Image (cartoon, rainbow, N blue to C red):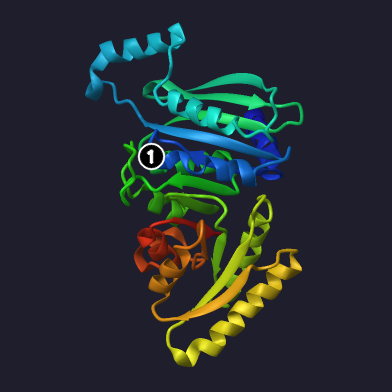
Amino acid sequence: MAETDVEFEEIYRARKARFRVLVCIDGSDDSYLGLNYAADVARGPNADIILLFVRPLDQGMRTGGLQVRVARENMLNWGLELPGMQYLKKGRDRLLEDPELPSEWGEETTHTDVEGDPLGDNKIEYQDASGKSIVLKVKTAPSIAAGILDQYELGPYDLIILGGSGRWGGRGISLWDPAVAEKIAVHSPCSVLVTRELKGGKGHLLCTDGSERAMEMVRKAAGLINKTKAGHLSILSVALDETGEAEAKANVEKAASLVRSLGVEPRSTFTRIGNPVEEIIKAGSEYSIIVTGDTGKSGIQRFFMGSVAFKVMEFAKNSVMVVR
């Protein structure tokens, strides 16, 4: 193993011991909605927030050939603003409005060459005396989704936050296609929060079917919610018909017992009868975030088979978190 590989392994292990949140910014209004949630869940010295902008790989001849490439190289030499960095700095400034964040930060800038693109990857890391970091990262990749997933491999991360990309009527102008959020939710190894009109104070709705996989989701979600200042939650289970209502009630109580054992008292527990996707979306509209678990299948299986979690993410009008 090369020395650089050893160094990367050490950095990766150190990062894995911290709570790390990746917030994907594209300049649209929706993409900034998750900043307050990121600051809330990642408060404390042992947590980091990384703001990411992904720009397409420059192909040179397709965007003006040699003249454009020379101009872009001159941007680096002249210290001009990199494409996307202005969006990240706007996000940074919004984060730093939180009075609980430190007021003094050190700053370090890093550039990484990317073959075929003169601008490459660029990063500004702000770190306070305790070691907490806020990172602004402009990443070059063949596609937005590929860049976000590749950034996870450099992480790792505990939570990825993305805006809903305008499909549901957001007023911002999205720089990536509307399906990016779904692609990341399907293929990401960690939990994903898709934000739409995210307003704090209305709590989280945890949805469970009583399965072992769902109970693991409940445990992880309760731990995540417990990190927030106003982290109240409710629990829902949906029965397909009246014959399954007793089982749904038992599922809710099992989940409630688990979160109580973790020091979280549910604000309410309830069941619904009907189509799970429709009932979850209807009940979840009263909450800040609907929280679901995935099927545990691989990304390709999730894509072809679908699941309640991803249908809720696709059709809900408010924010949805898929926990894994």
**Extreme top residue here?**
78
Query: Which quadrant would the C terminus be assigned to in this image?
Result: bottom right
Residue depicted at 38% across the width and 57% down the height: 317
Residue indicated by mark 1: 144
Position in image of residue 182 (x %, y %)? 39, 53
The answer to whether one can see residue 217 in this image is no
Badge 1 amino acid? Ile
State the residue at coordinates (49%, 68%).
295
- Horizontal side, residue 258 vs residue 172: left or right: right
**Kind of element beneath mark 1:** helix
Of residues 3 and 44, the one drawn nearer to the viewer in this rendering? 44
In the foreground, 14 or 220: 220
Q: Position of residue 113 (x, y in %)?
A: 47, 22
Image side of residue 51 versus residue 212, left or right? left
Q: Pinpoint residue 114: horizontal percent, then vertical percent.
A: 44, 25
Residue 130 is left or right of residue 247, and the answer is: right
